[in-house]
Image: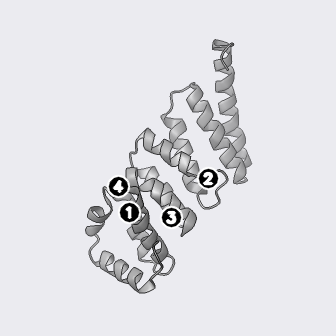
Amino acid sequence: ALRPDRVAEQLVVSQLVRHPGLIPALFSGLSEARAKKALTLLGRAARYYPDAVPLLARALAADLEHLAVPAVAVAIETNPRLDGLIADALAGRAISVSALERLAAAIPRRSVALTHTAVAVLRRLADESARGSAERASWLSNLSACFADQGRQEEALDTAEEAVVIWRNLAKVQPNVD
């Protein structure tokens, strides 16, 4: 298990601040277990050293496709600040639908630590789905529940209404399908 070591965390942060070009090489292509350890170290450091926050953002940008799921685990276990960093990374980068689906599956329902990430992922999945499809309606229903859990009632209602319209249209076209 990885044990907290503030001196080591400070050393890593200071070196990466001096040599930010190392981040893509260090964080790209890691196994999920190694990625989680590396992100945990920076996530812990970010609680005490503000310079670690942009390093985390840069690390996520280096290989978002492979780092997003381990980053979710770190946000839950170590530092909820990663929530905004993951959401920001998702907003500005291309990521495959399969990676988004893995990310959606990794986010616990009603997670306080991942509110921004949950909205970003579910919105992207709904946007990536075909207009009028059951898949889109399903993602919109999940997004609506996420908004409701966050107390964002207007957004929850608007999103739920969009999902209901799709479900009704599908029921008209395929009345015998469950």
Which of the two discs, 2 and 4, sits closer to the camera? Answer: 2
- Neighbour tally class for label 2: few under 14, some 14-19, many 20 plus, Cα within 10 Å: some
How far apart, in angstroms, are the residues tagged by discs 2 and 4?
22 Å
Look at 30% across and 79% down and name the residue there: 15
Q: Is residue 115 above or below residue 142?
A: below
Q: Report the side of 80 relative to 158 (left or right).
A: left
User: How far across and how far down the image is residue 87, in percent?
Assistant: 50, 55
Q: Amino acid at mark 4?
A: Asp
At which x and y percent is residue 92? 41, 51
Between discs 2 and 4, the one toward the N terminus: 4
Q: CA distance from mark 1 to mark 2?
A: 22 Å
**Considering the numbered disc 1 on the image, is that residue within a helix, a strand or a loop?**
helix
Q: CA distance from mark 2 to mark 3?
A: 13 Å
Q: Which residue is mark 3?
A: 74
Q: Is residue 15 left or right of residue 117?
A: left
Residue matched to label 2: 108
Residue that mark 1 sits on: 34
Q: Is residue 88 visible?
A: no
Q: Which mark is residue 63?
A: 4
Point 54% across, 50% down: residue = 106
- Please say if 174 is above or below 108: above
Pick whichever of labels 2 and 3 is earlier in the sequence. 3
Corner quadrant of residue 138: top right
Q: Position of residue 174 (x, y in %)?
A: 64, 13
Q: Alpha carbon of mark 3 to alpha carbon of mark 4: how far?
A: 16 Å
Proximity of marks 2 and 3: CB atoms separated by less than 8 Å = no
Can see residue 47? yes
* Residue type highlighted by circle 3: Val
Query: Upstream in the sequence, badge 1 or badge 2?
Result: 1
Q: Are marks 3 and 4 in contact (CB under 8 Å)?
A: no
Q: Which element type, helix, strand or loop, lies under badge 3?
A: helix
Disc 4 on helix, strand or loop?
A: loop
